[in-house]
Image (cartoon, coloured by chain):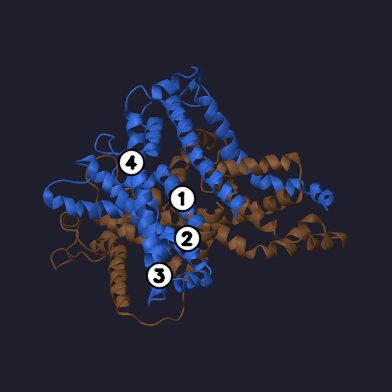
Chain colours: A brown, B blue
Amino acid sequence: MKPVRKYRTSDTVLFILLLICAALFLAPMLIVLMNSFKSKFFISSEPFKLPTAETFTGRENYLEGARKIKFLNAFGYSLFITVFSVIGISLATSMLGWYLTRVKSTFTTIVYYLLVFSMIVPFQMVMFTMSKTANMLGLDNPVGILVLYVGFGAGLGTFMFSGFIKTIPLSLEEAAMIDGATAPQTFFLIVYPMLKSTAITVAILNAMWVWNDYLLPYLTIGIEYKTIPVAIQYLRGGYGAVDMGAMMAMLVLAMIPIILFYLVMQKHIIRGVIAGAVKG
Amino acid sequence: MQKSMRRYAPLFVLPALVCFTIAFLIPMIAGVTLSFFKFTTVLDGTFVGVENYKLAFINNEFATSLWFNVRFTIISVITINIGAFTLAMLLTRGLRGTNTFRTIFFMPNLIGGIVLGWIWQLIINGFLLPKGVTIVTDPKYGFWGLVVLMNWQNIGYMMVIYIAGIQNIPTELIEAARIDGAGNRTMLANVILPSIAPSITICTFLTLTSGFRLFDQNLALTAGDPGKQTEMLALNIFNTFYRRTGFEGVGQAKAVIFTILVALIALTQLTISRSREEEA
């Protein structure tokens, strides 16, 4: 609240308290990292012990895990689906958001409220019928699933874009159109460049959702094309013990891209998440 | 302008709307309809009236998971919001390392539910194993495991929302209260908490909804064991659909009930926010 203030001893106490909290927050990730280098026989029984000469296995868990769940494939599917879903959602919902905001009719009002309604419906409501529909339409592959992600992402994206477009004065667009620009020209040359900050927010929220999503890819493409979350859960197998060594290594590999993305994009991510929470 | 836009309506509207129709609208309508049918593949249904809704409650299973879910959500909402608010207060005092702490506390929020579930399964079993039990020995372990996991994932997220709220309190307001002789407790109760009421509403409802919608974490941490006793609503619906042939209609009926529950929570939030805006 006050940027400049006098130093107090209680600050040291609070600082130490925060340090302890930070350690507690980081510990789970570090424990997984530590165990990923231990032989699978020593993980469940003594997860808090550092690897010793006897229990250390080097990169074996990583090789074994990556082989078992075809990690590179999973990474590829996850990356492909996330990148193209995010591009698709950003483009399709910004266009729809502009249209719904600028053209007022019964149709646009109904579409808008249907989209808002879809945001509060839990996935379980539609998962069964959606996966059957996807199957019948031949959307059960890494390209077809993009249609589903654009469909499920349409609510939040359109809502956020149209919320921002409402605040842009009409005059610029009108001037462009009077000068003879068509609607697509006006949108891509005048409107779209102004949407940058909302587009970043929409992209980040959707990237986090799609990358971590489990049920949708599991139900539609999970048998043939396993994304990272599906592949990790697949390690559990049907019956019998889970190979905890491979599990730990794969958890580490699953976390690394997210944490790197976070450290690079931190400001945008936190701003985006707050915007999403407040408006969604 | 509207006229020239309407000419291009298909270009702007169709990409998102077609995807939305396939992914959400058709499955939603089919889902509600099929909750009154007995079916196994969506095309072979016979009308059974409200039979599915009766069957949903014929044994205690659904009611048990509802009760488990309610208890879990209430406790999580309270602990997460107290934890998040406390951290937010500590991180708005201008202490050193504030940004680093914020980065660390928010980090778990980005990790996907499946990965989170396995991380905590390792850690909780690490504490329980010396006692000769595991997380699925007794439902109370699963319950508290889920609460801890949920806290770890969401405290940082809610914290950034509270920080934004606290930073928005006008400095003059705080100073005026100080000059008037407000102590720390009065300041908290009469200045800070009322000023951040919108943040409290947002955070309460975000945690409330995510508590009821929780699925991935539940699946990876306990998978509902022992004997379905830690199975929350979303997982119970999933298992009704996919683990019991002939019960698809019942699953769909449960999903409708679940949707109504989640929608009621969202509507309550909307009403509260609306009435506050009118007051202001």
Q: Residues within 10 Å of mark 4 (few under 14, many from 20)?
A: few
Does the CB distance between marks 3 and 4 fall below 8 Å?
A: no
Q: Position of residue A232 (x, y in %)?
A: 35, 51
Q: Position of residue A216 (x, y in %)?
A: 47, 44
Identify the residue position indicated by label 3 in the image: B91
Identify the residue position indicated by label 1 in the image: B206
Does the CB distance between marks 2 and 1 fall below 8 Å?
A: yes
Q: Chain of mark 3?
A: B
Q: Chain of mark 4?
A: B
Left or right relative to A116: residue B73: left
Same-subunit check for callouts 2 and 1: yes
Residue occupying the point 69% across, 45% down: B14
Which one is earlier in the sequence, the residue at label 1 or at label 4?
4
Amino acid type assigned to the residue bearing label 4 in the image: Arg
Identify the residue position indicated by label 2 in the image: B161
Dot 1 falls on a residue whose secondary structure is: helix
Does the CB distance between marks 2 and 3 fall below 8 Å?
A: no
Q: Give the spatial CA distance, label 1 vs label 3.
A: 21 Å
Q: Give the spatial CA distance, label 3 vs label 4.
A: 30 Å
Identify the residue position indicated by label 4 in the image: B71
Which one is earlier in the sequence, the residue at label 2 or at label 1?
2
Q: Nearer the viewer, residue A20 or B133?
A: A20
